[in-house]
Image (cartoon, rainbow, N blue to C red):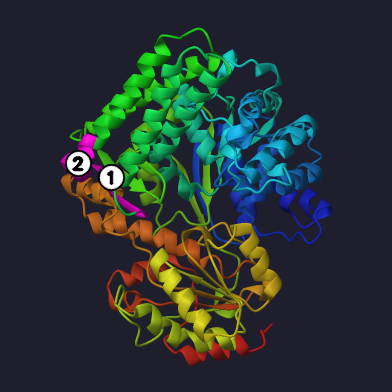
Amino acid sequence: MADDFAADGALAQAIPGFKPREAQRQMAQAVDKAIASRSELVVEAGTGTGKTYAYLAPALRSGKKVIISTGSKALQDQLYNRDLPTIATALKFNGKLALLKGRSNYLCLERLEQQTMTGGELNGQTLSDLVHLRGWASETVEGDISTCGGVAEDSQIWPLVTSTNDNCLGNDCPLYKECFVVKARRRAMDADVVVVNHHLFLADMVVKESGFAELIPEADVMIFDEAHQVPDIASQYFGQQLSSRQLLDLAKDINIAYRTEIRDVQQLQKSADRLAQCAQDFRLALGDPGYRGNLRDLLSDSTILRALTLLDDALELCYDVAKLSLGRSALLDAAFERAALYRNRLKRLKEVSQPGFSYWYECTSRHFVLALTPLSVSERFREVIDERPAAWIFTSATLAVNESMVHFVERLGVKKADSLILSSPFDYTRQALLCVPRNLPSPNQPGGAKQLARMLGPLIQANNGRCFFLCTSHQMMRELAEHFRATLTLPVLLQGETSKGQLLKQFVEAGNALLVATSSFWEGVDVRGDALSLVIIDKLPFTSPEDPLLKARMEDCKLRGGEPFDEVQLPDAVITLKQGVGRLIRDVEDRGVLVICDNRLVMRPYGALFLNSLPPTPRTRDIQRAVTFLQQAPTQ
């Protein structure tokens, strides 16, 4: 296998521009060994190591059934459409490859049929999208909605014509034989290598526990890329959630069943309308949007408790009315089961005195989520691993804190794993400069955004844009964008004004843009070459101490005799910062300046922990030196 990575190996012969990298070869050997011994392995592979090829080659060579889980649907598509075919061709791999996404990524023919029968309620654009989808449904082979041109990805039609675990009719569906999800699952069962994403993998683990038909087949090799995301995603799925979207969707399905199949039971419509109204009333009772708060505190408010009781009563009414018509409609039978499930969930969410969980809620302008999340997923994830004997491999560019894997392996319960830290092959001493400017405003200081914009405007201008300004809050992002738009002549792009893919395209095409963004641009974004040579981070990315989940994890840590700041807040912030920093140097030819606008990096003792966890880059406090570095021609 190691010969695949040699200067005259299979990869060099088949992939133009492939160069042997020692770190890549070391990782491939470790993966090969873990597969052979069916053991656990955790690898941090710095940017530029080539970790994707390093796990794909030994996985394809193993001849075993392999599942690869990655951090997002975009990375999943990239792996399946670009990286896997490249390696498969190079190694002359003849096995079958399959891509498997969650249910809501496939067109649901039954729900499309229902919408067509009741389409009179849809507005102009949504109705036009529905007509377009009917044509597409007869042409598509796989039903993957990301391949459907002509309907916007944020169209209101999608939730109406896709299914979720909750509302899928399963074997009772009249169109079960034509179902795109069932076909995708069959392809996955037959395939040698299946590409999934973390959300699907973990949702599937939870569904398996409740005895439903699962999507993901058993395998001999489990590989998690972007593994730093797994503990947080696992905590979502090992908890419980109830959202207004689920309740409104349930009300809609009961209404459709009434209008299409059970027209003689008008109580169905009345109970569904009442549920929808109570869900909207409860959202209004929560107050201002954009807030994540503590559910324990919320439920001590008598007004909120009254609104929640009315919501529970409305759910009970839907349950009782649907029960009287059981057996007359597969859609209504499924709605009845969901009403029972949601009532149990609501009951569980109201039991806020149970230890070991964080109880929280979140509301947007139109929706809400009520949730409980386990403070630790290590035991549950350990059970998942122990029930499935296989090689379990976790890799990412950001797993270690201060050159130690302890934080990651303890959070995920993989203490038995071998671990390996491989540095990036990039020459940071020559390619990059880290600047922590003098006279910075302190974090959260009033007027801080204006001061930063004034201080950094000349640097951005001197670099002719080509800059990501990564922020730790939406408020800071909006304020900075406003100041920059008022003072710079360069194009200023703002996250949220269009889709992520569209923004990146505009950024690269402009050639002189400033992109001001928050969390979703800190990772999974790859801009190489001159297009991006300046990355500015507004402050160290500590999660707000008011975040209920973080608060609960810190309290739990304290109860166990630990140090919450050192064991919870600090490691999380280090890993997030490493992700943001990783946007700058993406290739051996890249050059650039990283600016971190936080004095704590050089003034506080814990600043050293952040610096030790970052690539070894020369440092300065002088913005002028940063300007000079950006204007110099690269030294060979």
* Closer to the camera in the image, 52 or 301: 301
Q: Residue at x 55, y 19 (%)?
A: 169
Image quadrant in which you'd find residue 380: top left
Q: Position of residue 43 (x, y in %)?
A: 51, 50
Q: Which residue is mark 1?
A: 285
Place of residue 182 in the rendered image (x, y in percent of width and height, measured from the top left): 65, 23
Query: Cα distance, mark 1 to mark 2?
Result: 8 Å
540 is higher (above) or lower (below) than 227: below
**Residue 340 seen in this snapshot:** no
Q: Amino acid at mark 1?
A: Ala
**In percent of the image, x 59 and y 27: which residue is there?**
219
Q: Residues within 10 Å of mark 2 (few under 14, many from 20)?
A: some
Q: Residues within 10 Å of mark 1 (few under 14, many from 20)?
A: some
Q: Which residues are magenta?
A: 289-306
Which residue is at 34% across, 25% downward? 315
**Quarter holding residue 142:** top right
Q: Marks 2 and 1: in contact by CB < 8 Å?
A: yes
Q: Is residue 290 magenta?
A: yes
The percent position of residue 122, horizontal first and vertical second, equals 60, 38
Of the pair 408 and 422, the residue shown nearer to us: 408
Q: Which mark is residue 303?
A: 2
Of the residues under marks 1 and 2, which one precedes in the sequence?
1
Q: Give 314 or 19, whichever is nearer the viewer.
A: 314
Is residue 305 among what the camera can see?
A: yes
Question: If the image is split into quadrants, where does the N terminus sit?
Answer: top right
